[in-house]
Amino acid sequence: MNDPVTDATTHPATSEPVDIATEEAPAESEPKRSFLSRLPGIVVRVVSWTVLVVCGLLIVGFVLVPRLTGSTPYTVLTGSMRPTMPPGTTVVVKPIQFAEIKVGDAITYQLSSGEPEVVTHRVIGINVTADGVRLETKGDANPKPDPSLVREEQVRGKVWYWLPVIGYVTNGVTSDTRSWLAQGLGVALIGYAVVTLIVTVVRRKKKDASDESQDTEATPLVDAPEDQTAAEPIAAESTEQPSELPTRRSLRQQRADDSGQAK
């Protein structure tokens, strides 16, 4: 009597939709790009951000900071300060009190008081003369000290920090032109950073939207078998009802037979 129930619950038709859903869903996802195909784009982004960061640091270090602190950038043209400051080095000179200068400091001073030509050498001695305190200087690569002592009014400041090679780029460019170039480069770098950020955000939003749409399309295929499995108890009940009818009839016949025998 229980055969129909067994057939209804183990019929192959109820298991086929599950297999179809699990096999068709992966076909809708796009294949992932290999690392080699994405490598050129990664290299371009790394180089772009590296150039952006380096240029930004140079603008801050040799344009913005000197303006805010009253310092002045100079370019080393000779090899008298090798190997510490070779030709082409840009030095940032910060104003300092004359009394605070000590032996070992690298200072920038005028060769002649009131003249624009300057030199950067190291202090090797502080001499007290009848005319006042004088500084004795020498280039690191020079065999002898400088012939003239340096007076207070000649000193432009103490070397704060420096960077080689940068001077070759800025040498021959006036201060005003350097400022305009730095401002223009700064605006260009900021614009590039903003555009890059916007493009990255837009691409990420598109990718997230694509992933959500794929998940939405795959959901009905997974839920479909549940509807069929939900209908299985109904089929089971319908198969059980005919098994109850012969039992009731047999009881009625038995009662009739019993009543006849009693008569």
Image (cartoon, helix red, strand yellow):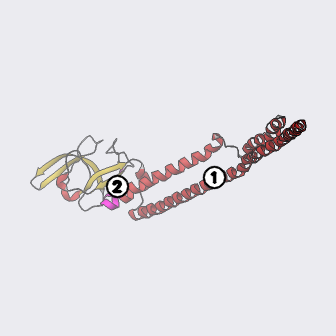
Report the quarter where the N terminus lies. top right
The type of residue carrying mark 1 is: Lys
Q: Nearer the viewer, residue 49 or 230?
A: 230
Q: In the image, 34: left or right of 55? A: right
Q: Is residue 148 magenta?
A: no
x, y (%) of residue 223?
A: 72, 48
Residue 110 can be seen in this image = no
From this view, report whether residue 99 is shown above or below residue 144. Answer: below
Contact flag, marks 1 and 2 (Cβ < 8 Å): no
- Res 240 → quadrant: top right
Q: Is residue 68 magenta?
A: yes
Label 2: which secondary element: strand
The magenta segment is 65-78
Q: Nearer the viewer, residue 83 or 147?
A: 83
x, y (%) of residue 73?
A: 34, 56
Q: In the image, 51: left or right of 240? A: left
Q: Which residue is mark 2?
A: 74
Q: Residues within 10 Å of mark 1 (few under 14, many from 20)?
A: few
Q: Residue furthest front?
A: 263
x, y (%) of residue 71?
A: 31, 58
Q: What residue lies at 24% left-to-right and 47% top-to-bottom?
A: 105
The type of residue carrying mark 2 is: Tyr
Q: CA distance from mark 1 to mark 2?
A: 50 Å
Report the quarter where the C terminus lies. top right
Label 1: which secondary element: helix
Q: In this rendering, which labeled residue sits more in front, label 1 or label 2?
A: 1
Q: Residues within 10 Å of mark 2 (few under 14, many from 20)?
A: many
- Res 249 → quadrant: top right
Q: Which residue is mark 1?
A: 207
- Res 233 → quadrant: top right
Disc on the earlier residue, 1 or 2: 2
x, y (%) of residue 9?
A: 79, 38
